[in-house]
């Protein structure tokens, strides 16, 4: 990347303050409480030298815990000391008790992706309303992506509905839509996909599937909002305005990340390849931060077995997260 400076931004969830630092490819910086580190977080729960962040030559960011006292978690999974893991826009990183949201304004090293992409989609001809039960029983949807080679497979309508409706509802809710209204927005987005074609295809040149789904959601929301006298948002306490592209991109990235993590966790757990004891060890030690010795006593395991279960399942979950991101954006 020819020594180009790449900006890393960490938004503090507590007060929305922004911590930023510019890195050059190949550089590693230290984050912590000490006044001499490159990225400083003034929190007593953060160690003086808490974690290291490295920018690879291809623009990908990695994070590594440096043996911190209170630990580092990425997307609610604890890092082992010395473990390096990639992170992206929208990810949640917690240092001690300080939780941050990642923003990478110039991208995260993913080929062909522009985080700001918001492709316009063609309007779909209006038809009679389609019921939820019909979505869940009629056929399947073929999604194709040509140039990038991702998402070229068939998805059942039930899976499509169950996979993306919670994401759309969460995003719409943060834009001021109440429960029923958010449900209606999600239903309309999926209905538009259904009406487009039994074998739906879209043009990869206009963006990855994540951006396409965002554009479809925004189109549906704007159409509904316009019917309400030109309002852009519905509620007095909405978090974002759907006419603010920067805010929209940030919140969509956060909701997308949350959706991907939940899907990855469910996929690994439902695979049946892990015992309930191992999964509970992962949940208690890897996600809730219960000390390994306490988990071991509770589950009649050795502390080393607890750590191994956590490490094994963490790798599987992160692998599934990467698979979804590679396929869908």
Image (spheres, helix red, strand yellow):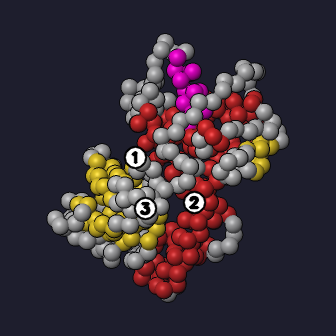
Q: CA distance from mark 1 to mark 3?
A: 13 Å
Q: Which mark is residue 321?
A: 2
The answer to whether residue 70 is seen in the rendering is: no
User: With respect to residue 138, does 61 lie above or below?
Assistant: below
Give the magenta-colored segment's residue range: 214-226
Q: Cβ–Cβ below 8 Å for labels 2 and 3? A: no
Q: Which residue is mark 1?
A: 105
Corner quadrant of residue 48: bottom left
User: With respect to residue 318, does 118 lie above or below?
Assistant: above
Q: Which residue is mark 3?
A: 61
Q: Is residue 222 magenta?
A: yes
Judged left or right of residue 322, residue 271 is right
Q: Is residue 13 magenta?
A: no
Judged left or right of residue 145, residue 183 is left
Which residue is most to the front?
A: 2
Q: Residue at x 23, y 60 (%)?
A: 40
Query: What secondary structure predominates along the stretch shown in magenta?
Result: helix
User: With respect to residue 203, does 277 lie above or below?
Assistant: below
Q: Which numbered disc flags the more N-terminal residue, 1 or 3?
A: 3
């Amino acid at each position: 990347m020819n020594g180009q400076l790449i900006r890393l931004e960490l938004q503090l969830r507590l007060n929305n303050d922004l911590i930023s630092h510019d890195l050059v490819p190949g550089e590693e910086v230290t984050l912590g409480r000490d006044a001499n580190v490159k990225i400083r977080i003034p929190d007593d729960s953060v160690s003086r030298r808490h974690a290291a962040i490295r920018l690879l030559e291809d623009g990908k960011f990695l994070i590594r815990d440096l043996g911190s006292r209170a630990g580092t978690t990425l997307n609610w999974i604890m890092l082992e000391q010395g473990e390096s893991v990639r992170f992206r826009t929208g990810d949640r990183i917690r240092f001690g008790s300080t939780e941050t949201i990642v923003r990478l304004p110039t991208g995260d090293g993913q080929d062909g992706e522009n985080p700001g992409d918001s492709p316009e989609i063609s309007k779909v001809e209006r038809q009679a309303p389609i019921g939820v039960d019909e979505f869940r029983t009629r056929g399947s949807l073929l999604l194709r992506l040509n140039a990038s080679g991702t998402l070229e497979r068939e998805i059942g309508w039930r899976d499509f509905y169950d996979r993306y409706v919670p994401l759309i509802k969460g995003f719409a809710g943060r834009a001021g839509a109440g429960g029923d209204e958010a449900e209606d927005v999600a239903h309309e987005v999926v209905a538009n996909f259904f009406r487009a074609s039994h074998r739906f295809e879209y043009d990869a040149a206009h963006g990855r599937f994540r951006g396409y789904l965002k554009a479809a959601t925004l189109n549906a929301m704007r159409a509904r909002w316009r019917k309400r006298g030109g309002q852009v948002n519905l509620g007095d306490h909405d978090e974002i305005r759907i006419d603010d592209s920067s805010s929209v991109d940030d919140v969509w990235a956060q909701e997308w990340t949350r959706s991907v993590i939940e899907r990855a966790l469910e996929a690994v757990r439902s695979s049946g390849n892990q015992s309930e004891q191992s999964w509970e060890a992962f949940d208690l030690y890897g996600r809730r931060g219960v000390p390994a010795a306490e988990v071991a006593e509770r589950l009649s395991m050795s502390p080393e077995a607890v750590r191994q279960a956590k490490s094994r399942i963490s790798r599987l979950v992160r692998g599934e997260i990467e698979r979804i991101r590679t396929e869908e954006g």
